[in-house]
Image (cartoon, rainbow, N blue to C red):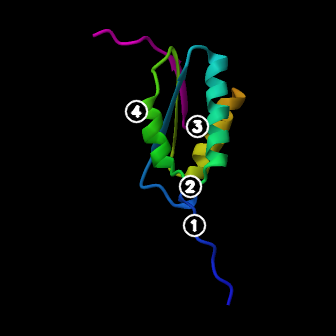
Amino acid sequence: TPTEPEATPGDRPLAGPTPWTLSAATEAALRDQARRLLEHTAAHPDHTASDIGHSLATTRAALAHRAVVLADSHEDLLTRARALADGTDAPGVVTGTGTKAKT
């Protein structure tokens, strides 16, 4: 009997809305960050959407141009990150600018 292929982490359902946060010095660089994120997820299908979101939120600098991609599924995260990379509007994608907090 044929067996079902084992699901990769990217295929597993998310527990709820998952954010992917990105930042860059310029708007063009922000789109490039989204492209690199898509390349990374394609090259590492074993990385979960939640793990990627955690790494993006805790290991990246908060630069002037920022975006949050928010979705309930891995596929929607990828679709919305693609829209960010292309510079098009999409539900679940918020962009803006900010300043570094002073302590």
Q: How far apart are marks 1 and 3 (CA)?
A: 27 Å
Q: Tell me residue 52's x, y (percent).
A: 50, 43
Disc 1 from disc 2: Cα separation: 10 Å
Residue 93 drawn at (x, y percent): 56, 33
Tags 4 and 1 touching, CB below 8 Å: no
Percent x, y for residue 19?
A: 47, 39
Q: Which amino acid does label 1 sit on?
A: Ala
Of discs 1 and 3, which sits in the foreground?
1
Give the magenta range: 92-103
Q: How crowded is mark 3: few (under 14 residues within 10 Å), some or many (20 or more)?
A: few
- Please indicate whether residue 68 sits to the left or right of residue 33 in the image: left
Q: Along the polypeptide, which appears first: circle 4 or circle 3?
A: 4
Which residue is tagged 2?
46
Residue 26, position as x, y percentages in the image: 61, 14
Which sits earlier in the primary sequence, circle 1 or circle 3?
Answer: 1
Mark 4, Cα crowd under 10 Å, few <14 / some 14-19 / many 20+, is: few
Give the camera-side residue of 57 and 13.
57
Name the residue beneath numbered marker 1.
7
The N terminus lies in which quarter of the figure?
Answer: bottom right
Q: Residue 30 carries which label?
A: none
Q: In this view, does 71 lie above or below 62?
A: below
The nearer-to-camera label among 2 and 3 is: 2
Which residue type carries mark 2? Asp
The residue carrying mark 3 is: 91
